[in-house]
Image (spheres, rainbow, N blue to C red):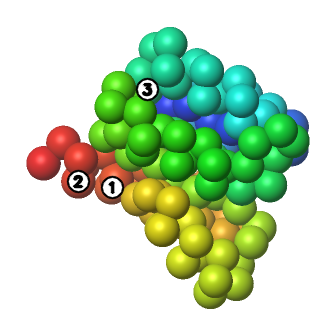
Amino acid sequence: MATVVLAEDDPDIRDLVAFKLRQVGHEVRPFEDGVSALTSAREDVPDIAILDIMMPGISGLDVCRELRNDPLTADVPVIILTARAQESDIEAGFAAGADDYIVKPFSPRELASRVQAVLARVQA
């Protein structure tokens, strides 16, 4: 299936997302901060990135912008997974280059489906 870079500072959510995505066949590279996720994505380009917004060091929005600005990772689809649910937050996510935006709390099954949908759109 796909290689997923996952940046989520909450260990419970990180473990849940990684478990669900592995369950449906994806390889997941989980990180607790944006800097590590960005470094990993640049060293070994993933098929998709899932980013929390509020993380120590660098936010998920900044990671998304960095991915978009680097020719090597510019085409990596990004899903923002965050508790920030205001309309302005969602607009900021898409303005940073996100392909999808999922608000916590979320359904792990829905997340897996949306990962599949984003990957299908990119591959089409």
Residue at 80% of width from left, 32% of height from top? 32
Question: Pointer 1: what residue?
Answer: 117
Foreground mark, 2 or 1, reads 2
- Circles 1 and 3 in contact, beta carbons < 8 Å: no
Q: Is residue 12 visible?
A: no
What amino acid type is highlighted by mark number 1? Ala
- Circles 2 and 1 in contact, beta carbons < 8 Å: yes
Which quadrant of the structure image shows residue 16? Answer: top right
Residue 61 image position (x, y, % from top left): 63, 54
Residue at 71% of width from left, 36% of height from top? 34
Between the C-alphas of marks 1 and 3, the distance is 16 Å
Relative placement, left or right, of 99 versus 18 is left
Foreground mark, 1 or 3, reads 3
Question: Pointer 2: what residue?
Answer: 121
Residue count near mark 3 (Cα–Cα under 10 Å), binned few <14, some 14–19, many ≥20: some
Mark with earlier residue (3, 2): 3
Which residue extends farthest bottom? Answer: 87
Relative placement, left or right, of 28 versus 56 is left
Which residue extends farthest top? Answer: 43
Which element type, helix, strand or loop, lies under badge 2? helix
Relative placement, left or right, of 44 versus 57 is left
What amino acid type is highlighted by mark number 3? Pro
Which quadrant of the structure image shows residue 46? Answer: top left
Question: Pointer 3: what residue?
Answer: 46
What amino acid type is highlighted by mark number 2? Arg
